[in-house]
Image (cartoon, coloured by chain):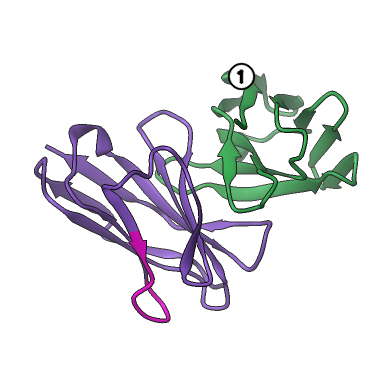
Chain colours: A purple, B green
Amino acid sequence: EPEVTQTPSHQVTQMGQEVILRCVPISNHLYFYWYRQILGQKVEFLVSFYNNEISEKSEIFDDQFSVERPDGSNFTLKIRSTKLEDSAMYFCASSEGVGEQFFGPGTRLTVL
Amino acid sequence: GENVEQHPSTLSVQEGDSAVIKCTYSDSASNYFPWYKQELGKGPQLIIDIRSNVGEKKDQRIAVTLNKTAKHFSLHITETQPEDSAVYFCALENTGGFKTIFGAGTRLFVKA
């Protein structure tokens, strides 16, 4: 069964460093998303991406964040200068269209 | 903006009993309402969804009801089993369909 994959599973970085979180969505999906979940809290929408451009983004997704689909399979989230409060689980998701989203296992980002 | 309130935050039931989780929302234009189950250390997984042209949907032991007039929707799990223990999130898609808003989650404990 096709699934969304994410790498790395855990990323530790120093405050102020740049990180890139990687996702491989399900191959025939056209819509891609990033969410974050601070430990024990709810899942928060960051950004959606369709047709090689951002469709919608939340207030969290400020200038420090960017997304890219560098090739036909990867979808990345970059945080330019990490802050302590960026520590969270980051989930990638994909969908064929509007509707059911398939989530990856997440990347745990720890900013020291 | 869009908001989803979810209750209760924690629910403990005996195996075999029913569990009900309720959500209310503010964006009357929303028309897609998914429910996700999140097990420890994993990403959310869709368990059932409902669109606004339907009042109720059932899939084996799981059912969802939607009242668009009152702007609330509920998840019903019957004959609960220990493996139903997880965190459950209600969610909705905003009008454009590119942004999913999650509720705060309900931690369900099913005691054997």
Residue at 44% across, 40% down: B40
Residue receiving disc 1: B12
- Residue type at numbered disc 1: Ser
Quarter placement of the N terminus of chain A: bottom right
Label 1: chain letter: B
The correct choice, above or below, for A16 with respect to B24 in the image is below
Quarter placement of the C terminus of chain A: top left
- Which one is in front, A39 or B3? B3
Residue at 77% across, 33% down: B28
User: Magenta segment, which residues?
Assistant: A67-74
User: Residue A81, percent across and down?
Assistant: 16, 46
Residue B83 falls in image quadrant: top right
What element does badge 1 sit on? Answer: strand
User: Residue A54, percent across and down?
Assistant: 47, 60
Please count the marks in the image.
1
- Which one is in front, A33 or A26? A33
Residue at 70% across, 27% down: B26
Q: Is residue B5 magenta?
A: no
Q: Is residue A87 left or right of residue B96?
A: left
Q: Mainly helix, strand or loop, the magenta region?
A: loop
Whether residue B44 appears in this view of the structure is: yes
User: Residue B58, percent across and down?
Assistant: 85, 45
Residue at 40% across, 44% down: B41
Q: Is residue A96 left or right of residue A36?
A: right
